Image (cartoon, rainbow, N blue to C red):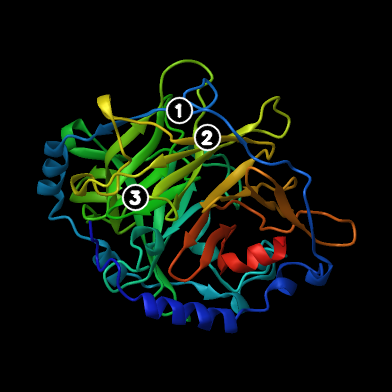
């Protein structure tokens, strides 16, 4: 199905990649004093081990559930006609600062080797009390890299709840999740507007906030899929980019209020249109990070679980095909009973994976730093090897970003986008591969 100008501007994309390659920012020194010239690679973490998707370790069916259409229609009849991404971007009046104007403490979280070629920071006052999480872009949504005429980045944030404390202190009692819609048409002038993620309740007469940290997020065609730790069995929530609602009351409340509808200060609300649940039983793994892989046919969603470093088991990875049915645009391919089954599964020795990316036969895993102010490790793995950049005279592999952040590949430009603390950054996938040899 063609969405918003699919298959256009490939020549423009090649020109943009060439421009980005020639205008890389010198951000390594801002991230750390470690010299990139000292970087080497290591093979210490072990190759991926394929596991059967029909085995107990590799099997992870996700069952699709739809919010009843009448619920969504009832909500829209009370809140007003839904709007799309363009309306949110028209209200994007909050600026992201270029790296040169960002605080040194924020820039310290940027990757060491390879260095970011573009970086921006959110304002501390606008994000106080919120924890950064997942990133996806219009490069996921459409293969020409645009949604309509716009280049867009989505940055997910969580407040309290099961996500723990924020960047600036302990967790508040209430858990919420929201997304910054970033207008990236002008790379020198990024601006954004907030939209709250919500779940319809009471037959569509009201909604509540999504009480879950956003550790993974994929925008594919007209759907946004986000990871969730809400409840016992929810794995992913699904949002429709053509069903965005306007909030009408400026308030810290969420849902129906006196005089209209509130979204905890956000101007827009995305009500969930569906979800994917996990099978029952004890010890069922949960996707903690997801990303899109356009190098497969059909396009696929890849997922990783979170396994602590001191656990006595290895981390599992899965691949799910996305539907080719135009009537199911943006959803996982399902069989009988609405079940989406993985077509590939692997185990890896890399623990504490907070971001996963797959492209062709290679998987890239973002391992969390060992200390709150430290840097993580970016591993590239396949079925034959595992490599991570080393930096510094002590041979450390903690060369990647600090803070939390997922990975998203913008195929049209060749860039990988991620987020570390308040820093939103990008660098070419080719530079990652060059650093890894």
The mark that comes first in sequence, 3 or 2, is 3
Instruction: Determine whether, in the image, residue 87 is placed left or right of residue 366.
Output: left
Mark nearer the viewer, 3 or 2: 2
Instruction: Determine whether, in the image, residue 303 is placed left or right of residue 73.
Output: right
Please tell me whether mark 2 sits on a helix, a strand or a loop: strand
Residue at (27%, 47%) from the top-left corner?
Answer: 324
Residue farthest to the top? 281
| Depicted 181 relative to depicted 279: above or below | below
- Check disc 1 and report the residue beneath it: 60
Where residue 185 sits, quadrant-wise, is: bottom left
Mark nearer the viewer, 1 or 3: 1
Instruction: Determine whether, in the image, residue 402 is placed left or right of residue 133.
Output: right
Query: Within 10 Å of the Cα at label 3, are there few (<14), some (14-19), or many (20+) other Cα atoms?
Result: many
Please tell me whether mark 1 sits on a helix, a strand or a loop: loop
The mark that comes first in sequence, 1 or 2, is 1
Give yes or no for contact between labels 1 and 2 (Cβ–Cβ under 8 Å). Answer: yes
Q: Which mark is residue 321?
A: none
Q: Nearer the viewer, residue 131 or 61?
A: 61
- Check disc 3 and report the residue beneath it: 224
Disc 3/disc 2 C-alpha distance (Å): 23 Å
Where residue 111 sits, quadrant-wise, is: bottom right
Disc 1/disc 2 C-alpha distance (Å): 9 Å
Counting from the top left corner in percent of width and height, residue 267 is at 30, 59
């Amino acid at each position: 199905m063609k969405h918003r100008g699919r298959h256009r501007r490939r020549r423009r994309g090649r020109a943009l990649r060439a421009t980005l390659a020639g205008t890389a920012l010198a951000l390594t020194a801002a991230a750390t004093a470690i010299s990139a010239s000292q970087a080497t690679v290591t093979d210490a973490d072990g190759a991926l081990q394929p596991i059967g998707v029909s085995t107990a370790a590799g099997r992870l069916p996700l069952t699709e559930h739809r919010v009843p259409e009448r619920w969504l229609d009832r909500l829209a009849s009370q809140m007003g006609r839904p709007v799309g991404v363009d309306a949110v971007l028209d209200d994007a009046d909050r600026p992201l600062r270029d790296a040169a104007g960002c605080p040194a403490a924020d820039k310290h979280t940027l990757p060491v080797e390879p260095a970011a070629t573009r970086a921006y920071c959110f304002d501390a006052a606008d994000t106080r009390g919120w924890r950064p999480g997942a990133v996806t872009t219009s490069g996921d949504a459409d293969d020409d890299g645009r949604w309509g005429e716009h280049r867009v980045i989505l940055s997910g944030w969580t407040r309290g709840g099961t996500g723990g404390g924020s960047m600036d202190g302990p967790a508040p009692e209430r858990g919420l999740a929201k997304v910054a819609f970033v207008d990236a048409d002008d790379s020198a002038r990024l601006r954004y507007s907030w939209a709250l993620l919500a779940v319809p309740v009471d037959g569509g007469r009201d909604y509540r906030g999504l009480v879950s940290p956003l550790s993974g997020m994929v925008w594919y065609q007209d759907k946004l899929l986000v990871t969730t730790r809400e409840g016992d069995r929810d794995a992913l929530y699904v949002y429709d980019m053509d069903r965005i609602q306007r909030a009408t009351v400026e308030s810290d409340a969420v849902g129906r209020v006196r005089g209209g509808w509130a979204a905890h200060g956000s101007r827009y609300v995305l009500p969930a249109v569906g979800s994917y649940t996990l099978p029952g039983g004890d010890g069922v793994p949960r996707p903690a990070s997801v990303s899109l892989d356009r190098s497969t046919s059909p396009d696929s969603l890849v997922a990783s679980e979170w396994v602590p470093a001191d656990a006595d088991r290895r981390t599992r990875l899965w691949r799910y095909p996305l539907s080719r049915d135009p009537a199911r645009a943006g959803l996982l391919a399902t069989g009988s009973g609405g079940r989406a089954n993985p077509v590939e599964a692997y185990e890896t020795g890399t623990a504490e994976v907070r971001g996963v990316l797959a492209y062709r036969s290679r998987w890239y895993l973002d391992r969390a730093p060992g200390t709150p102010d430290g840097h993580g490790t970016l591993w590239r793995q396949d079925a034959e090897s595992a490599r991570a950049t080393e930096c510094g005279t002590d041979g450390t592999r903690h060369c990647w970003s600090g803070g939390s952040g997922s990975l998203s590949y913008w195929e049209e430009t060749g860039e990988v986008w991620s987020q570390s603390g308040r820093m939103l950054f990008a660098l070419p996938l080719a530079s990652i591969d060059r650093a890894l040899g």
